[in-house]
Amino acid sequence: MTVALPARPVPLKFEVGARTLIAISRSLARVPLTLDDAREGRLPQLPPLEREAHGYTVTSLPQDRQAAMVYASGGMLPFVRQRYTRYFTDFAGGFDAWFEGLSSNARQSLRRKAKKIAAESGGDLDIRAFRTPEELEAFHDVARRISLRTYQERLMGSGLPDSAEFLHEMVTQAAADQVRAWLLYIAGEPAAYLYCPVVGDTVIYAHVGHDPAFNDLSPGQVLQLEAMRDLFEEQRYARFDFTEGEGQHKRQFSTGGVECVDLLLLRPSLMNRLTTLALGGFNRTVALGKKAVNAAGLGKLAKKVRRGS
């Protein structure tokens, strides 16, 4: 007997930037594609839904497979939640070759930022790596305090988790040598963290954040650079997976990417139809407003206002 895929409440948010105006909750079963799935264009199988579930959320589906996925769903109601490139870095070739593959502006900027942070710390970068269970427990205590100060935590609740389930998973994975994590200190103060579980030969970009007090020094970019150096030097991984979502740093550090969508497949009920129509119309209005703001040269100011900074 096939077991139904568990579903959980997912808020479909009416958002302006990072701020949620209202949200409509739908019970959705998550069907994630791995980076390899996305790169090879594999369609996931959709397990049976629980009776109370409203549908599926299929993440990292290649854009050119969207119509095929809707057809395979048997007539469910599709709604694209977001579009993005799923970026990755191939570890073949070594750190020096990868770094030289970045744009000259990116290389100069990263060197300048690293030098500036090192000067604040007495001349050397203070970056600490963690991988054992005991080390990861110490990492979590410090990284969690940084996370509490980030805008991701304050506005979106998406900081480094501190649940019992996450801590158990972290320690279990660390015991199997399946976690890599880093902290960057500036002048003795913890400034940024990066937490990456390992699945097979792929390192996953899972949780990242920095103290906004150090915004001007770009600690996250410098920490990412040094983490990449460590991972290249280990010579045991095939790639770094930047997962879902866009970001300048992801584009900057990547060697490739797959154009993807997060696709909702909903039961074709009247309520679901009305919800997707309303959300689609709202998103189009916000996109037009954003375009107008950027055209007026007010994009940076609007971003600061949305973050409350």
Image (tube, rainbow, N blue to C red):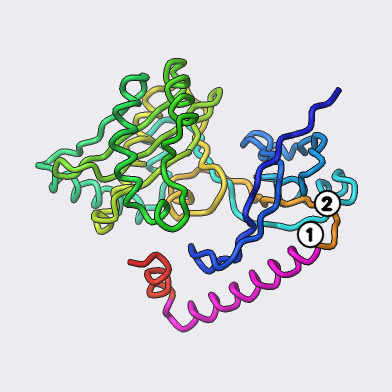
Classify 10 Å Cα crowding around label 2: few (below 14), some (14-19), many (20 and above): some
Residue 23 — which label?
none
Q: Do the residues labelled 1 and 2 touch (CB within 8 Å)?
A: yes
Examine the structure image and report whether residue 205 is included in the region drawn in magenta. no
First to last magenta residue range: 273-298
Residue 108 appearing in the image: no
**Marks 1 and 2, how far apart in space?**
7 Å
Going by the numbered disc 1, the residue's amino acid type is Asn
Residue closer to the observer: 287 or 151: 151
The residue at 77%/39% (across/down) is 43
Q: In what element is the residue under mark 1?
A: helix
Determine the main secondary structure of the stretch shown in magenta: helix
- Point out the tag, 1 or 2, that comes first from the N-terminus: 2
Residue 54 appearing in the image: yes
Judge left or right: residue 44 versus residue 261.
right
Could you tell me residue 252's position as x and y percent? 44, 50
Task: Identify the residue position indicated by label 1 in the image.
Answer: 272
Could you tell me residue 39's position as x and y percent? 66, 39
Q: In what element is the residue under mark 2?
A: loop
Judge left or right: residue 75 versus residue 233.
right
The residue at 34%/48% (across/down) is 148
Judge left or right: residue 191 versus residue 29.
left
Could you tell me residue 17's position as x and y percent? 50, 66
Residue closer to the observer: 87 or 45: 45
Farthest residue to the top: give it: 176
Task: Identify the residue position indicated by label 2 in the image.
Answer: 267
Could you tell me residue 144's position as x and y percent? 34, 40
Looking at the rendered image, the quarter that the N terminus falls into is top right
Examine the structure image and report whether residue 296 is included in the region drawn in magenta. yes
